[in-house]
Image (cartoon, rainbow, N blue to C red):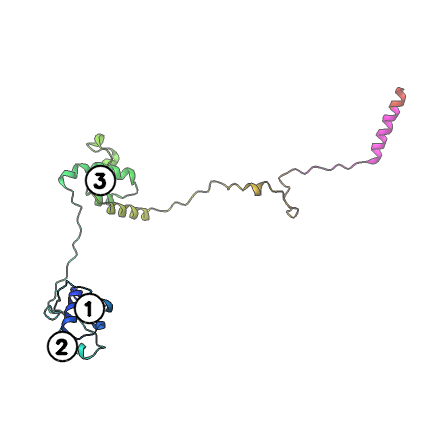
């Protein structure tokens, strides 16, 4: 996508007032909608904007405008700038500067971060609070010279860092933390409908949990023999 001109609406106002270019040509060059250019021509849009001459600013040449006026299908192109700006060097961010009035609050902020966000690394705490690794270790080990008087305080409320920076470091630490798989604490309980349902006949091992009653074979002759003995004993007693 080609870059549009500086102050596109002001440039469009000048082109509408001083050229015979079509709305589509002006809209394409200024990166506007054709209806918006039509509104500029009707006085409904950009009523208080003064037109900017793109020729004097070096964004268009007079030859390019004349070529576009003679050919409705021609699209305007930005003129190449004769002034080459030097490339801006990226400035490396150094350690966060902490005002002198807030430096005594850094141990309290470190204590708050260590307790509430133990997943943060020392380098992350150093970026948030602007402290040293030695101070962080002293606060953790309770060997700081003022450890007895330290109270955990949110570094955001102290003005040592912004909430956006704190959330970014916490989310970054959470991504680096290894995922812990859930431990299996045994089988899950079955619903009452399953545990209380009667087993079907098609299940071969359905009655394995319950002892099956043994069926005794009945001898008919022994039963009648016992009855005869009981009858004889009754007659002898009489």
Residue 114 x, y percent position in the rendering: 27, 38
Q: Quadrant of residue 43?
A: bottom left
| Depth order, front residue of 184/69 | 69
Image quadrant where one finds the N terminus: bottom left
Report if residue 158 is visible in the image. yes
| 56 vs 182, nearest the viewer | 56
Contact between marks 3 and 1 (CB within 8 A): the answer is no
Residue sitting at x 86%, y 27%: 229
The crowding category of the residue bearing disc 1, from other C-alpha atoms within 10 Å (few below 14, some 14 to 19, many at least 20), is few
Q: Which residues lie in the magenta part?
A: 211-232
Mark 3, secondary structure of its residue: helix
**Sequence order check, earlier mark of 2 and 1:** 1
The span from disc 3 to disc 1 (Cα, nearest Å) is 54 Å
Tell me what residue is drawn at x 27 percent, y 46 percent: 167
Q: Label 3: few (<14), some or many (≥20) within 10 Å?
A: few
Which mark identifies residue 157? 3
The label number, if any, that marks residue 86 in the structure image: none
Task: Give percent across and percent down for residue 105.
Answer: 19, 37
Query: Which residue bears the numbered disc 2?
Result: 63
**The quadrant where residue 86 appears:** bottom left
Sort mark 2 into few (<14), some (14-19) or many (20+) by Cα contacts within 10 Å.
Answer: few
- Residue that extends furthest to the top in the rendered view of this protein: 238
The residues tagged by marks 2 and 1 sit, at their Cα atoms, a distance apart of 27 Å
């Amino acid at each position: 996508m080609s870059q549009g001109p500086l102050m596109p609406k002001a440039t469009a106002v000048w082109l509408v007032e001083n050229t015979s270019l079509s709305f589509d040509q002006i809209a394409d060059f200024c990166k506007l909608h054709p209806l918006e250019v039509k509104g500029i021509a009707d006085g409904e849009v950009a009523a208080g904007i003064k037109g900017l001459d793109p020729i004097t600013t070096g964004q268009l040449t007079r030859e390019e405008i004349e070529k576009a006026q003679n050919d409705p299908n021609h699209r305007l192109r930005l003129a190449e700038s004769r002034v080459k700006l030097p490339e801006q060097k990226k400035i490396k961010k150094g350690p966060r500067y902490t005002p002198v009035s807030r430096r005594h609050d850094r141990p309290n902020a470190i204590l708050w971060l260590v307790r509430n966000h133990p997943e943060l690394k020392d380098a992350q705490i150093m970026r948030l609070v602007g402290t040293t690794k030695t101070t962080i270790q002293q606060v953790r080990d309770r060997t700081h010279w003022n450890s007895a008087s330290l109270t955990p305080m949110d570094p955001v409320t102290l003005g040592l860092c912004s909430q956006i920076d704190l959330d970014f470091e916490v989310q970054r630490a959470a991504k680096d933390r290894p995922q812990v798989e859930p431990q299996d604490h045994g089988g899950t309980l079955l619903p009452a409908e399953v545990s209380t349902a009667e087993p079907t006949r098609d299940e071969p091992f359905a009655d394995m949990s319950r002892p099956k009653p043994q069926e005794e074979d009945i001898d008919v002759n022994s039963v009648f023999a016992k009855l005869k003995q009981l009858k004889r004993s009754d007659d002898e007693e009489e």
